[in-house]
Image (cartoon, helix red, strand yellow):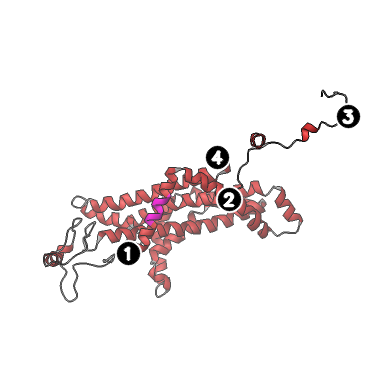
Amino acid sequence: MKKNPFSLHVNMDDFIPATAEEKEYMVQMRPSTTFFKDGVKRLLKNKVATVSFVLIVLITLTSIFLPMLWPYGYDQQLGQVWGRPMDPSYNNLAPFEYGTTEQARIAAGESIFPHIFGTDSQGRDYFIRVVYGARISLGVGFFASIIVLIIGMTVGSIAGYIGGKVDIIIMRIVDIIYSLPDTLMVILLASVMKVSLGALIEGTVLAKLGSNMISLFVVFALLYWVSMSRLIRGQILSLREQEYVLASKAAGAKSGWVIKKHLIPNCISVVIISTALQIPNAIFTESYLSFLGLGVNAPMPSLGSLASDALNGISSYPHRLVIPAVVISLIVLSLNLFGDGLRDAFDPKLKN
């Protein structure tokens, strides 16, 4: 029946339940997710970042567990037998070559594990030294980034939240540190602390790390936190004006509680990205300091120290320089690509 347009009666056809097709047309349903799950999903779609992450994990696991299974030690001189002079035939072996004693044992039918990268000038297996060097470089990178993260997050949060004179003083200190030449200051501080820390840590647990390694961490704690603190400060300045922060203050929350419960969690994506990009910088810094002789103490190897030692025989044994250089490049490139992937996946401004 034709309905009178001026009638006050309700049209019952408007209350007929919608069909499944109409619902699907009108409403586009999306499964519920979290910020972390959404970021991981976008990260996995980035093939370059995923491959870089897998490569980092493989290198890390190899550097941790392979030395437990490898038959040679990083400081073991293969030609040294107790009570006998050093056998020079083990020095500077090419990849998959053997010393005279090993050749005799092979001729007798014995199985000998090969020297994949040969040996160095002191008859030590070069492959296991590269693996230990990767372990040292990765360890320095991760721990230095944690130090930078803790100091930078603490200083940046205080400066951004409190503001006023505190912010001005902290930022002027940051500007002074920024004005210093990084490379020169790192070399000078490492040289000075190498001498001063040696007597302080002698006979302590820290003596196993060595004065060079401790001075390296001190350098990171003194110089490399400024960029992280500026980044955190900028985030806190924008977040402290939000309504939930004002509500917490009105409820009587203390400043430390507001920073820990509201401000830091809301800028955690930026913190993760910055930390991931800080790791390759720390590895590169450790490598060139070890290359200059200011890194790990001998006989502990580092990728930088291995490259430095290889310079003496670069014309005769170029592979001893190429191998650690390739490993450094591979680690730093993978970490940089993975950090870029994290930024693209977790930065809300880059979602589209």
Disc 3 versus disc 4: nearer the observer: 3
3D distance between C-alphas at marks 4 and 2: 19 Å
Magenta stretch bounds: 53-59
3D distance between C-alphas at marks 4 and 1: 42 Å
Q: Could you say which disc has been placed on residue 230 in the image?
A: none
Mark before the other along the chain sequence, 3 or 1: 3
Disc 4 versus disc 2: nearer the observer: 4
Q: Residues within 10 Å of mark 4 (few under 14, many from 20)?
A: few
**Where residue 319 sits: x, y (%)?**
23, 51
Q: Residues within 10 Å of mark 1 (few under 14, many from 20)?
A: some
- Give the residue type that dot 1 points to: Pro
Choose between 316 and 118: the one closer to the eye: 118
Give SS at disc 4.
helix
Q: Could you say which disc has been placed on residue 8 in the image?
A: 3
Disc 2 versus disc 3: nearer the observer: 3
The residue under label 1 is 67
Q: Could you say which disc has been placed on residue 232 in the image?
A: 2
Choose between 172 and 334: the one closer to the eye: 334
Question: Do residues under tags 3 and 1 come within 8 Å of each other at their CB atoms?
Answer: no
Res 290 quadrant in image: bottom left
Q: Main secondary structure of the magenta part?
A: helix
Q: How many marks?
A: 4
Q: Residue at x 38, y 70 (%)?
A: 208
- Give the residue type that dot 3 points to: Leu
**Where residue 246 sits: x, y (%)?**
73, 51
Choose between 237 and 196: the one closer to the eye: 237
